Amino acid sequence: MSVTTDNPAPAGPSRLEGFLVNGGVVLVLLVLVVAVSAAVEPRFLNKLNLMNMGRNFAFLAIPALAQMLVMTTGGFDLSLGAVVASGSVVSALVMRSMGADLPEAGVAPVLAALAAALALGLAIGAFNGWLVARFNISAFMVTLATASAIVGVVLFQTQGIPIYGVSEGFIDLIGRGRIGPVPYVALIALALVALGIVMQRGTRFGRHIYAVGSDARAALLSGVPRAKVLIATYALAGALAGVTGFLMTARLGSGQGTIAETLAMQTIAAAVIGGVSLRGGVARAELVALAALFLTVMANAMNLMRIDSKFQTLVLGLVLLGALALERLVLREKTE
Amino acid sequence: MTDVMTRRSAPALADRLKPFSLPLGIVALLLVFALIEPRVISGANLRNIALQTSFLAIFAAAQCVVLLTRGFDLSLGVTVSLVSVGAGMAMTSAGVAAGLAAGCGIALAVGLFNGLLIGAIGINAFVATLGTSYVVMALASTLSGGFPVAPLPPAFNAIFAQGSLFGIRAAIWVALIVLLAIGLMLRFTTLGRRLYLVGASARAATAAGIRPAAVLIAAYAICGLLAGIGALLLTARTGSGEPNLGGNLTLESIAAAVVGGAKLTGGEGGISSALLGALFITVLSNGMNLVQVDGYIQQVFLGAIIVLSLILGRDGARR
């Protein structure tokens, strides 16, 4: 506990804490990384690069919302990356089997693929939630194990080979489509973030998620159906991950079982940087979205500066640990 | 502190039968595989199982030590990779002894880093070791440039992989010594009892004048060191420093520990958990290999086994 002596909290815990809780850190980080990148790398503000960032933002923000929901209940979902991969593979398989690449196929295979990815994500999520709620076992362990199982099935099915035969129209519209400079997928992500905010603030389900995460016993006593809320939350998270897989398939032009290998950790990083508490009960969708934007911009800037991907993993790990340490050191007064 | 121990040694009837269920399960599993593929119970394969078990038992013991404190080490697999690469590089330039020292030093450093994050700063163990695992993974692949470090000095392989004493392989000896040492440490030393106490109740430990932070740091340091020892043995066996050596080891070590009966709620489990759990997982994967179950499908079984043992071994009182 000697480390507490050099933490900045005692100087002004309430103000600093307020700033942190209200997303000050995320904003400062975001502005900083944008300013530095724009100054150092002129291509950063290039229109194509901005659109690229918009898409990458979507592919992180949507699963980060999913992670946020689960973390609000006091859990974790380590299987999100695996669900994204399975969503991508199942989307492509459905489209291929319905002959989506034939000119006369129309929109039906695409809708069927979306439905399949949604249903698969929903089912896996509900299973995770059921295991956590029914048996009271650690969400972290449950989802670690299901992630291993899902990845096993996906790689067995694909043997690591991309699945082609997805609809060209699908790639054009969802993968490349945009309104002005804003890609569709970014708009979809923003819409989901808005829905998340509304759900968190304005719906009974949203309040139930907070209640289960803040104090499970109190929630139970006050009539919140804990098991149902948990299952619904994990199912919703799974569905969001399934949709992410579907959208990524449009971008990649094929179903891939090896995408999103580090996604679970990126989403946890986004959630933690966005101020979601690891003990549950504290989360704001808009801050998680800002944090996802920050991570996206940072990754993009490092790519532009030709920083090795291994080094990027290192930076991501350090950013996550830094955010966790900051949360603990600054908010310790409040939580202990 | 002895209270905790005595209470645990007088369990209910169901719990008293439990110790026998896993050994019986292992024998049953072995027989089922033998019915499909008789080679499973050949002398050569049983010796192979013993050898495989000794590696996994060391990693499971590492996991058990931190599980006792309600912790967890997700960075174990990548630590194995980093140690393999680091020790390999030290060995090729400065000899076997330097390699062993470098390997143990790296492992201890990663363990201490985790311990500081979890014990001193108070970060949740799952997420802290998840973060560490990405840092360590990046270091392992950067250090090696993605390529195996080879050739290693022949003496290393000759002693730690091929070497044997009284007909028993070096790796098995090392595993026995390590398990015995950890077992004695847990049972008879102050640190051992403190590990149980901190896991059972950090508040009670604090009230008893124990600093949980110091105990946690020690736990992760031991965990790291054990991962390092296992990594050195595996490196001797493959004969090169491998940046992907750790692969599935995090999951397998956790599976072995929880199958063996270590509880995620801390304060329970010991060295027999590690040994029996490792034996079970090894028999399972060895059997699946021999009856030619696809490697990816084996991953599904591993996941299912973890969930099943969590359900069977759960502590109903905890969320």
Image (cartoon, rainbow, N blue to C red):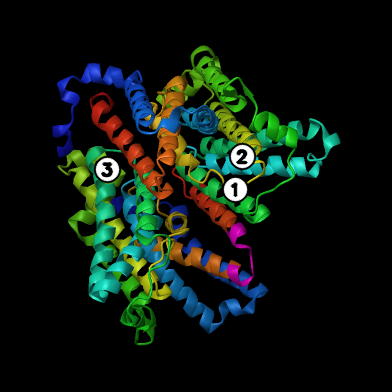
Instruction: Name the chain letter of the residue that bears numbered label 1.
Output: A
**Residue B55 in the image: x percent, y percent?**
40, 68
In the image, is A326 to the left or to the right of A89? left
Residue at (27%, 43%) from the top-left corner?
B117
**In this picture, is A173 found above or below A85?**
above
Pick out the residue farthest to the right: A104
Looking at marks 1 and 2 on the same chain, the residue that comes earlier in the sequence is marked by: 2
Disc 2: which residue: A124
Instruction: Name the chain letter of the residue that bears numbered label 3.
Output: B
Q: Which quarter of the picture shows residue B97?
A: bottom left
Instruction: Give the numbered dot on residue B117.
Output: 3
Looking at the picture, do discs 1 and 2 lie on one chain?
yes
The three-letter code of the residue at mark 3 reads Leu
Q: Secondary structure at mark 1?
A: helix
Q: Quadrant of the N terminus of chain A?
A: top left
**Residue B166 in the image: x percent, y percent?**
34, 87
**In this picture, is B124 found above or below B104?**
above
